[in-house]
Image (spheres, grey):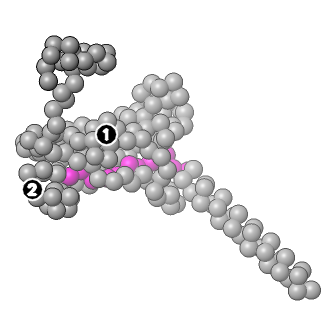
Amino acid sequence: MRNMLTNILLMVLASSLLLECSADAAAGEDTQVFHVAGKVLCQDCAQGWNEWVNGANPIKGSKVSVTCLDERSRVVQYASDLTDDAGDFDVTCNKYVNGKKLNPQNCFLRLVSSPDPVCNIATNFAGGKSGVNLHRPTVVYRDMVKYVLGSFYYTTPMCDEPDTTTPDDQDGDDDAAEQGNY
């Protein structure tokens, strides 16, 4: 009798978990849009290490973009947003383009521009310069599907490392060694 009650209780528990999981998975199915959110900050390398790591300031009016591709790697959607006073952005993207469902994992976010006259060099901290692919939504609740990404950074021209590679460096030949330069 006790084993039978335990089995019934386990079956009820398992079925309730299954129903809850399927309801969570279907929560974002009805939405027509998804959101991509994050923050844009200015990081100044002229400060001390502690201020550099912890003292980034938000940039108001910085532009970020979300670009979505189809299964053949063609751009099918482009959306952008400007940051608010706190440096926060929230880009809204359509889930359906030309009647086809868009796969958010084929979308990426990148930094576009900074209105700050001093802090306007995009960095690749957190991938903002090259672009960050969307993976899993952070928020799936009722009619809201949201991908919350971390912070993205701009820096000053003084902090930017120049690209010192030349097209000749990619061949694998060491011209400086051949010329006798040390």
In the rendered structure, which amino acid carries the disc numbered 1? Arg
Sequence-wise, the earlier of marks 1 and 2 is 2
Q: Quadrant of residue 13?
A: bottom right
Quadrant in which the C terminus appears: top left
Q: Is residue 36 magenta?
A: yes
Residue plotted at (70% across, 63% down): 18
Q: Is residue 170 magenta?
A: no
Residue denoted by label 1: 110
Q: Position of residue 181 (x, y in %)?
A: 13, 19
Secondary element at tag 1: strand
Residue plotted at (69% across, 64% down): 19
Relative placement, left or right, of 152 versus 98 is left
Q: Quadrant of residue 160?
A: top left
Q: Quadrant of residue 15?
A: bottom right
Vertical comparison of 98 with 86: above or below: above
Overall secondary structure of the magenta stretch? strand
Residue plotted at (39% across, 54% down): 148
In the rendered structure, which amino acid carries the disc numbered 2? Gln
Residue plotted at (61% across, 55% down): 26
Question: Is residue 66 visible from the viewing direction of this image?
Answer: no
Q: Position of residue 134 (x, y in %)?
A: 44, 44
Q: Position of residue 126 (x, y in %)?
A: 32, 47
Nearest the camera: 173 or 93? 173
Residue extent of the magenta highlight: 30-41
Q: Which mark is residue 47?
A: 2
Nearest the camera: 103 or 3? 3
Structural crowding at the residue carrying mark 2, measured as other residues with C-alpha within 10 Å and reported as few (<14), some (14–19) or many (≥20): few
Relative placement, left or right, of 100 versus 93 is right
